[in-house]
């Protein structure tokens, strides 16, 4: 359980670092003179943004699958966007800001629910053990 989570987190961190590095490289290519709104660097920045969103979507999908949380439906236009890369025939979907927020809220709610269940059982067991200890101490005196 923990091994796959750590492995996925490590992979996510490495991919995001590579994405940030490529984004910094694209931003370094901004022309100093001329029109900064067009050119190849604009496409590179957009591609890096979609790449970052794909990495985040993959990580959130892993967490949601692990916790048994449903992702938003791909038919909902507000939840997903599709990459516009010419070199990727599959044109995968990524979560938009609204979809990321909804997925994170669902993951947080599930984690909170699991913590509350565990806390209930821990406090119950501690309470019973305390009561038994108190009864034994009274009985021996």
Image (spheres, rainbow, N blue to C red):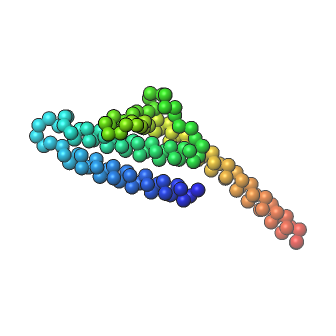
Q: Residue at x 60, y 43 (%)?
A: 68
> Residue 84: in sight, yes or no?
yes
> Residue 108: in sight, yes or no?
no
Q: Nearer the viewer, residue 114 or 49?
A: 49
Q: Residue at x 49, y 44 (%)?
A: 60
Q: Quadrant of the C terminus?
A: bottom right
| Residue 89 % position (x, y) | 37, 37
| Residue 30 % position (x, y) | 18, 43
Q: Residue furthest front?
A: 89
Q: Is residue 119 left or right of residue 102?
A: right
| Residue 71 % position (x, y) | 53, 37
Residue 123, placed above or below residue 51: below
Q: Nearer the viewer, residue 100 or 43?
A: 43
How many dots with numbers? 0
Q: Is residue 78 left or right of residue 41?
A: right
Q: Residue furthest left?
A: 33
Residue 104, placed above or below residue 79: below
Residue 131, placed above or below residue 116: below
């Amino acid at each position: 359980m923990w091994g796959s989570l750590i492995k996925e987190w490590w992979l996510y961190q490495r991919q995001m670092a590579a994405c940030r590095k490529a984004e910094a490289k694209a931003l370094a290519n901004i022309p100093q003179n001329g029109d900064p709104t067009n050119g190849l660097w604009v496409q590179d920045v957009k591609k890096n943004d979609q790449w970052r969103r794909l990495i985040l979507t993959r990580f959130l999908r892993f967490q949601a699958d692990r916790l048994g949380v449903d992702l938003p439906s791909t038919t909902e236009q507000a939840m997903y966007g599709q990459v516009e890369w010419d070199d990727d025939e599959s044109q995968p979907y990524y979560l938009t800001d609204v979809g990321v927020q909804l997925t994170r809220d669902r993951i947080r709610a599930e984690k909170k629910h699991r913590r509350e269940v565990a806390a209930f059982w821990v406090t119950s067991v501690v309470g019973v053990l305390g009561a038994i200890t108190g009864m034994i101490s009274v009985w021996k005196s």
